[in-house]
Every structure is written in structure tokens, then in C-alpha cells.
Amino acid sequence: MSYPLEAGANYNLIFTTFDRSLTGRFFIVVSGPARVILRSMNTTLNQSSTTTSTTVATPGVTIPANAKWSQNGVTVAGGNGGGNATNQLDWPRGLFVDDDQTVVIADTENGRIVQWKDGDTTNGQVVADGNGEGNGLHQLNYPIDVLNDKETDSLIICDQGNRRVVRWSRRSGTTQGEILIDNIDCWGLAMDEQRNLYVSDVVKHEVRRYRLVEMNGTLVAGGNGKGDGLSQLNFPAYLFVDRQQNVYVSDKWNNRVMKWNKGAKEGVVVAGGQGYENALTQLSFPNGIFVDTLGTLYVADTLNHRVMRWTQGDNKQGTVIVGGNGYGAGPNQLSFPFGLSFDRHGNLYVANWSDHRVQRFSIE
């Protein structure tokens, strides 16, 4: 028989043999773009039954090559001045978007992680810290980036002011986090499909990959001192890792984005690297980055107050997809964009650093 599976959903597949004499293998055939993870949850041999939990992971975001977005963004979080009220943000930076379009934001100056549910733009909810700056396990200090670990239903946070990476459960009642990596000048975070964690270090100018079960870091980009050579980085900020474990790095002070193929000793410039002005060949202090399933790169071009798109294989010139209308708080303007992300529909979310808001630009 066949049954359609919805991406992002969980299913329990129960196979039972009522005749104990029936033995042998069974096969599950899955077609389509979604990745399927099978986990054995419970086996009762004396009843000849096996229960397997199956998670259909949401596929990477596919965006048409000629896609366009509304030039007027809608504020979905903050926008009420800088502050620590539930309807405010204070210098937000990294963010991600859940499958249900909940936006989770590193509310940096407030020392907390907040979420804003789709359809409720009035108030956010603190989901990590909110206890004031400090170095206790119940506190954060200058969180810069955050990602979602679906496997453990937890947040992984670059707690930059405390020089550590922490994990904070999303389950109700959680009052403190746990330290995953200590004594690291972290900035950007990413996770691949094998749940390896990637962390940029802005003092060592490198990116390392960590296995969560062992936390032994392996150098995957940079690590050859500060510089602009192809084997070097200069303030590696935000990260993206594709399905082939290639690492994209916003090489901030080199005004470029680098791609380090898995196992490579040098990176390749895939955007910018031509100075720091506002030509279409240039970036100026790039921060948040995202790569879709076609290999198209999206960059928060911070000092140019715009988001740019660079198609695969064309590192000479990008195109402006939103912003580029000068610094400001208008619906068609950005103000020092830092974090960016897309939801599964292709809508773009941008964290505006200096006007304390997150905007959504709908795909047309």
C-alpha cells in the first residue's frame, strides 16, 4: 500500500506479525525529496512485533531562480524601539524560523532568546534566560546566534559574552542551560544533517566542526591567522552548511563570503571580495547568510542596508532582492541587517539591528 507523508511531521509505523512462524525482512520505500530517519523505539520479541518511529525531515528550502519578494516588509517582531519589554527587541542579531513560522531571535543586548509566533506581532515570549546578564547556567550574556536542534527539542546558542556555546531545552519549565563548548570566542552556528555542530571563532579566525557526543573540534575553515588569503579568514561571522557538508562563511572584515568544500585546505570566494562599497560586485561587512537547494546564496549586506542574491557559479556580481533604499525604518528599508532566514514557503526574514525589529518579505 502507499501513503503520502507530510514534510515536517512525525509518524509511527507499526508492523505486527500475528503468526509467530512468519519471519524475515520487511522494506519501507520512500519517494520524493524529503529525508527520512528511522528510529527503533520499542521491540517486544515475545509478541513478534516491532514499532518504529519515523521522522520526515523538512527538505531544504527550494526557491525559484527568478523569484521576487515584496519590496515592503511587514514587521513580525519588535519595531517598538529598543528595550526589554515583551513587545521590544534590543539590537537583535541571529535568528531562525520554525516550521510553523515562529521566529526565534537572539535578542542580544537584552541577553535573552525570544520567540514570536506567526500571527502575533504584538508580544514575544522569552524562551531562554530573561534573568539578566551574567555567567550562571540560568543566564546569557550577549547571545549572538541561535539554532534549533530538533533531535533534542532544544536551542543551541552562542553565548558570546560568556565565551561559550550552550544548549537550552525548549520544553516548558526549563530554567537553565548546559555548556557544550567553553572558552571559545564564538559568533556563528550551523548544524549539518548528521547533527555535527559548526562554530566560528572570531579571535582565532577559524571555523570548527564538533560532534555533539564528543565535542572534539575539527578545523574546517581558516585557522591560518587573520588575513585575506584563500586559506585565511578575518572575523568569520555567520555560517551555513549544505547537505554535502560544504561550509559557507561570511568573512566579515574581508567583505566577502567564502565557501570551503568539505576537506578543503583553502576556500573559494563566492560573493564580494572586491572592496567594501555598494557596487553589485561588492559587500560591506556581510553577516547572515543562507543557501537554498539550488545553491543560490543570500547575504545580509549590513553596511549597505540590503539583502543580496548570488547565483551558483557567478561570483562576479549579485542582485539586490530587498532593501538598498538607504538606511531607515520604512517598510522598504533596512537598518544594518544582521540575521536572515527563510521559512519553508520561501518568505524572507531579516533582523534589523539598529531599529530593533524583524521584517518579513513575502515571496511573490
Image (cartoon, grey):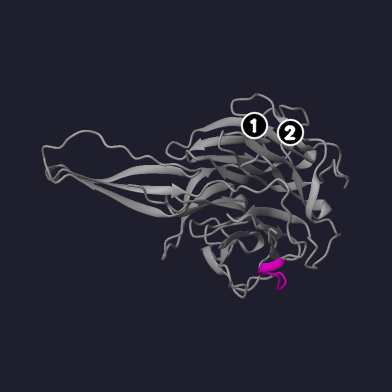
Indicate whether residue 168 is drawn in magenta. no
> 310 or 159: nearer the eye?
310
In this picture, which residue range is highlighted in magenta? 74-82
Mark 1 surroundings: few (<14), some (14-19) or many (≥20) residues within 10 A: many
Instruction: Classify 192 as above or below 130.
Output: above
Residue under the image location 70 percent in, 59 percent down? 364
Report the residue at 42% width, 39% height from top: 213
Q: Position of residue 98 (x, y in %)?
A: 54, 58
Mark count? 2
SS for tag 2?
loop
Q: Residue 221 carries which label?
A: 1
Compared to residue 217, the image places residue 15 above or below, namely: below
- Choose mark 2 or mark 1, whichever is in front: 2
* Left or right position of 23 against 61: left
Q: In this view, does 188 lie to the left or right of 278?
A: left
The disc at residue 313 is 2
